[in-house]
Amino acid sequence: METPRLKTIEIGIHGQSPEKPGASKMDVGMWKRPNVVVVLAMVMWGMTISVASADIGWNPSRTWVFAVGILQWKHPDIYGSFPDAMPNRADRRLINTLKATGIPDDHIVFLVDERATLAAIRREYRSLLDRIQKGDLLIFYFAGHGTRDRKTRDTYFANYDASDDYASHWPVKEIFDTLESRFHGAQAILMADCCHSGTMYDETVKRREKLSCACLTSAYSHNSSTANWTFTESLLRGFQGSPLVDADADGDVEIREVALYAEQNMAFLEEQKAMFATSDDFDPNLVVADTHGKPKAGLGRYVEVEWEQTWYPAQIIAIRGAESLVHYVDFEASWDEWVGPKRIRNPHVKKLPRGSRVKVWWSQDGSWYRATVLASQFGLHKITYDGYSHEWDEWVPSSSVEEWDE
């Protein structure tokens, strides 16, 4: 495995390697655009979802929101836009859901697309932090592109005017440095839906004694992400109080349950490892929403469905007697169908123990690389490659891993 061949870039710019003449030298971890958009089908589950009420564990009147959502960029040759994600965009619906809890309008800053320049982001972020009082809560959210410098191990979020050098980007480390120096509130909830967003998780762990915060991200720090709204939709359902997020069915949705729901969705639908961490003094049982009603048993469950003697991953989106309406992962809604219990089984999830020797398929160059398993969760495996630093460690799906007998 030669050094230049192992992911010098997570996703090339329009299929190009950044090492080619005229291309960016950055490690541009983009939201990968799959061929078929995965549908969560939440609206088909036949329930009315209400937003958080007075019984939640945070005070909306003392809550502040700083959010950035970018789906198109000034330099499309560097950062491609996401036109398919623009209709009914989930970032805006998330902010509207938070606003509906009673957060004052002047406590919310939401920078969208061309408004989210680096200068504007820095100015508005600092200004909002300066207004937050002792005891207040901050909710931070970012969606868009993320990129990582493999040499320095620094990660950046791509503001609207980000160009072909890292200096034009918003450093994740700066987000936390600014928070430490200017934030005088009690706690913060930090969320990001983009490639390499797990760097926010890393920073939370590093600063867990300095900041009181919870962090939820769509991907591990070394991994790219997807072009779907799967992660943000998971956050949205949590803050709306969907009973599907209420894992212990106690009528409350805690922040840890939102994280678990997001992790399961990302693993099953996107083959991607979402991350969650809290600082030492942040209670993971903080209630973010009340639930209203209970779904039928099994509704929303991930399963495998038999079709012509092959088992396909799917999700139960409605129940009628003994039959279930299933939505097949990576298929259009036109393939949804009612099936009986004989065609449904629990997912067969591969779990390799820590230390397992494996070979990992890397699709960008069509090669197998030897590696060792560090951890397994939800059918994903964290691996470290032979002969490479831990900077290249990543979470990979079971479909890309095979046991290897030396």
Image (cartoon, grey):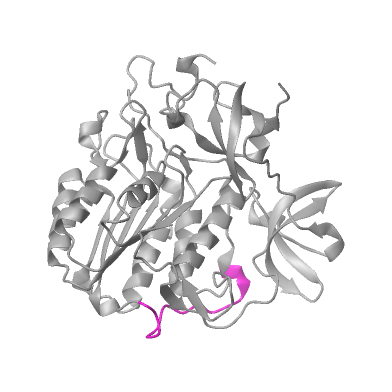
Quadrant of the rendering where the C terminus is positioned:
top right
Q: Where is residue 25 in the image (x, y as percent from the top left)?
A: 32, 23
Asked where in the image residue 132 lies, by quadrant, the reply is bottom left
Magenta stretch encompasses residue 118:
no
Q: What predominant SS class does the magenta segment belong to?
A: loop
Q: Residue at x 87, y 61 (%)?
A: 342
Instruction: Examine the rendering and report whether any part of residue 66 can be seen.
Output: yes
Q: Where is residue 93 in the image (x, y as percent from the top left)?
A: 39, 65
Q: Give the number of callouts.
A: 0
Q: Which residue is drawn at 70% across and 31% down?
A: 402
Q: Residue at x 49, y 33 (%)?
A: 393
Image vertical order of residue 199 relative to residue 55, above or below: above
Q: Residue at x 20, y 33 (%)?
A: 167
Q: Where is residue 59 in the image (x, y as percent from the top left)?
A: 30, 79
Magenta stretch encompasses residue 48:
yes
Viewed as shown, does residue 399 lie left or right of 206? Answer: right
Image vertical order of residue 289 relative to residue 165, above or below: below
Asked where in the image residue 18 lies, by quadrant, the reply is top left
Quadrant of the rendering where the N terminus is positioned:
top right
Camera-side residue: 333 or 340?
A: 340
Camera-side residue: 151 or 48?
A: 151
Viewed as shown, does residue 354 lie left or right of 310? Answer: left
Magenta-highlighted residues = 43-57
Viewed as shown, does residue 364 lie left or right of 138? Answer: right
